[in-house]
Image: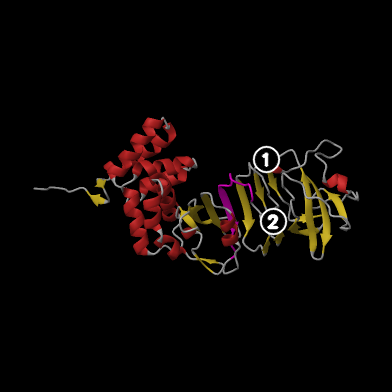
Amino acid sequence: MRIIYDRVKDGVRILRCFSYDGQVEIPEKICGYDVKELGPYVFSQKLRRVMPGEKFEAELGWGEGESHLGVKAEEALLQAEALADGTPALRGDRLRSISLPSCLQRIGAYAFYNCERLERLRFWGGLEDLGAGLFTGCARIRYLEVILPPGGKSCLKEVLTELRQTLYVSCLDELGQIQAKLLFPEYYEESVENTPARILTQEMHGCGHRYRNAFSGTQFQYLTYDRLFPHIQVQEKSELVAELVLGRLMYPVQLDPERKAVYEEYAASHGRELFLAAEAGRDRKALWFISSAPWCTLECLDEMLQEGQRRGEAQATGILMDARRKRLEAGTSSGGKRRRFEL
């Protein structure tokens, strides 16, 4: 990847990127300097124009550990569709996933404007400044990975507020290990006109806005999130509800025992939906978790098996059949021991 950047007070700011690959990992350093900012419109389909009189010292770099080329970036280079060697500009629908560095502090306005194929974003929770209209036109974003330092501030709420579609969020520690898997449902606002009264009212649809408010300041509140479960049960499809339940049971960080029992009761009676939730991510670990869980009854296993066989998922079906066989051999059904009658 080739990068046009300029110097800022405490590092560098990326102005444009050129790459053949739509899956991008922004380096921590460029030519020995920390990457502190992403400039306005940096990945936007619509390029930012250099304003008259605007001054910056832009250079063309390769990334960490390599010296820059010393090429002064003219406005024409910032607007170019490709470099002289043919490397295309990374913008708009060419960007599919991006991983941001830990030292990044600011992202400029409309940085991802109309990146219509962007689906996955990985970022650190310590971001301090998110520009206006950051994800305008990014309707395909589904997966967020956020690294949350313990006890530190988080920009997760601001990111969630910018995106109204259904989101699957993985919360990671600083080593990249998953600590929690959360689901935030879709929501949207509708303007409704009351013509006789000459009043325009806003109506909210979906429970996603409730889940996005499960914060106290910048700290995510797991208990508040879990208490919203009745809303998603009523307003969303059972397949989506099962995905939320599975994520919370597999990674039960700060999961209250009462809320855990509610989730387990729902899971035990929705074997088909649990199977679909596990298979959506091809997560064999999830299948092992479900089939060995105390709350997973024999009836739940049978329901999962039927769905697996119907869909022709041989590997998943094999895992479930093995779990069922072990369950029967151990003489357990629904977590209880087989009765023995001795004379």
The x and y percentages for residue 79 are 82, 44
Q: Is residue 91 magenta?
A: no
Q: Residue at coordinates 57% horizontally, 58% vertically from top-left?
A: 161
Q: Is residue 343 left or right of residue 36?
A: left
Q: Residue at coordinates 72% horizontally, 51% vertically from top-left?
A: 26
Task: Residue 332: tell me if it is visible.
Answer: yes
Q: Is residue 145 magenta?
A: yes
Front-most of residues 268 and 37: 37
The x and y percentages for residue 205 are 46, 52
Q: Specify the amino acid type for callout 2.
A: Pro
Helix, strand or loop status at disc 1? helix
| Crowd around label 2: few <14 · some 14–19 · many ≥20 (10 Å) | some
Front-most of residues 165 and 225: 165
Q: Is residue 200 above or below residue 116?
A: below
Label 2, label 1: how many angstroms apart (C-alpha)? Answer: 22 Å
Label 1 sits on residue: 93
Tell me which label, 2 or 1, sits earlier in the chain. Answer: 1
Helix, strand or loop status at disc 2? loop
The x and y percentages for residue 255 are 42, 62
Magenta stretch secondary structure, dominant = loop
Q: Specify the amino acid type for callout 1.
A: Asp
| Residue range highlighted in magenta | 136-149
Image quarter hosting the N terminus: top right
Front-most of residues 197 and 124: 197
| Crowd around label 1: few <14 · some 14–19 · many ≥20 (10 Å) | some
Q: Which mark is residue 101?
A: 2
Task: Residue 104: tell me if it is visible.
Answer: no
